[in-house]
Image (tube, rainbow, N blue to C red):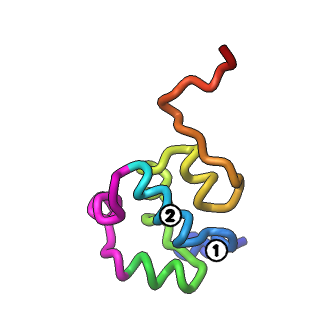
Amino acid sequence: MPNAENIPIPCFTSRRLRALAILKYGHQHRLHARLPVSPRTLAVQLEKGRLTEPIVQALRAELGDAGWRFVSGQTDTLRDESVSHDPA
């Protein structure tokens, strides 16, 4: 079982996080301003492939379920949750 303070996220990539931040917030710095750590701290943790529990919780809260699944590599599809995807 991983240490509760150091959660391994093997598929989590900064490229996906950057893409989602731009799509959802217009720019990365708007997402970073909402997190409990500096952009540099987040970058260091991403490079190591391990995120602390407070960052995981903050990212999940900000990105929502679909966004979290996308940035963590659980899915390769990102859909706009505010738009109906039902066939007409």
Asked if 58 appears above or below 85 in the picture, the reply is below
Q: Position of residue 45 (x, y in %)?
A: 49, 80
Please name the residue that numbered disc 1 is placed on.
8
Kind of residue sitting beneath label 1? Pro
Confirm whether the magenta stretch covers residue 26: yes
Point out the image quarter for the C terminus: top right
Q: Nearer the viewer, mark 2 or mark 1?
A: 2
Secondary element at image label 1: strand
Mark sitting earlier along the chain (2/1): 1
Residue 43's quadrant in the figure?
bottom left
Mark 1 nearby-residue class (10 Å; few <14, some 14–19, many ≥20): some
Label 2 – label 1 distance at C-alpha: 16 Å
Secondary element at image label 2: helix
Which label is found at residue 17?
Answer: 2
Point out the image quarter for the N terminus: bottom right
**What range of the chain is rendered magenta?**
25-40
Residue extending furthest front?
88
Determine the residue positioned at 70% across, 54% down. 76
Of 76 and 62, nearer the camera is 76
